[in-house]
Image (spheres, helix red, strand yellow):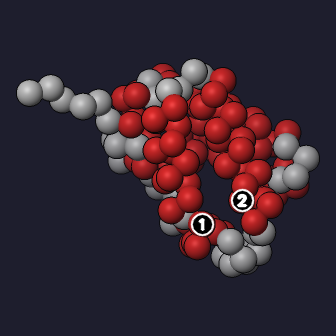
Amino acid sequence: MTDTPSLYQRLGSVDGVTAIASDIVERHLKNPLIKQRFQESDPEELKVLVLDFVTMGTGGPNNYQGRDMLTAHTGLNLNEREFVTTIDDVLAALDAKGIDPVSRMEVLAILYSFKDEILFR
């Protein structure tokens, strides 16, 4: 019987997920369609929150201390274009790290599972 690696492990565990989280934040901060949403954010704190969220959401150790998706996005009134742009940044970060297509699709499915908690809140 073989153990199937978790998504967290397939993303590279601590080192891989840390690099991906950092890349995601850097892409968001530079993305002309969404960068204004992060003007008030501390990039280093944001990287830690994204790291902890991705770690927890992909089967790694649960250290996430941030707000849930609904609470974090209420009042922002994010639209579909911003949502897709954010996902595009995540997928670009995964591609840059050479993440395999199956793992990439699993991340995409996780992201889309939050759509109703993020859009138009």
Element type at mark 1: helix
Dot 2 falls on a residue whose secondary structure is: helix
> What's the residue at 81%, 42% (across, down)?
29
Q: Which residue is mark 2?
A: 83
Where residue 53 appears, as percent x and y from the top left, is 49, 49
Please tell me in which quadrant of the rendered image residue 27 appears. top right
Amino acid type, residue under disc 2 in the picture? Phe
Residue closest to the eye, 121 or 46? 121
Label placed on residue 94: none
Q: Residue at x 60, y 31 (%)?
A: 94
Residues 1 and 15: in front is 1
Please state the horizontal and vertical placement of residue 23, each as a whole percent of the image.
68, 31
Q: Amino acid at mark 1?
A: Lys
The reply, left or right, for residue 119 in relation to residue 65 is right
Coordinates of residue 78 in the picture (x, y in percent):
76, 69
> Where residue 89 sits: x, y (%)?
72, 41
Please tell me which of labels 1 and 2 falls first in the chain: 2
* Disc number placed over residue 115 in the picture, else none: 1
Left or right placement of residue 97 versus residue 16 in this view: right
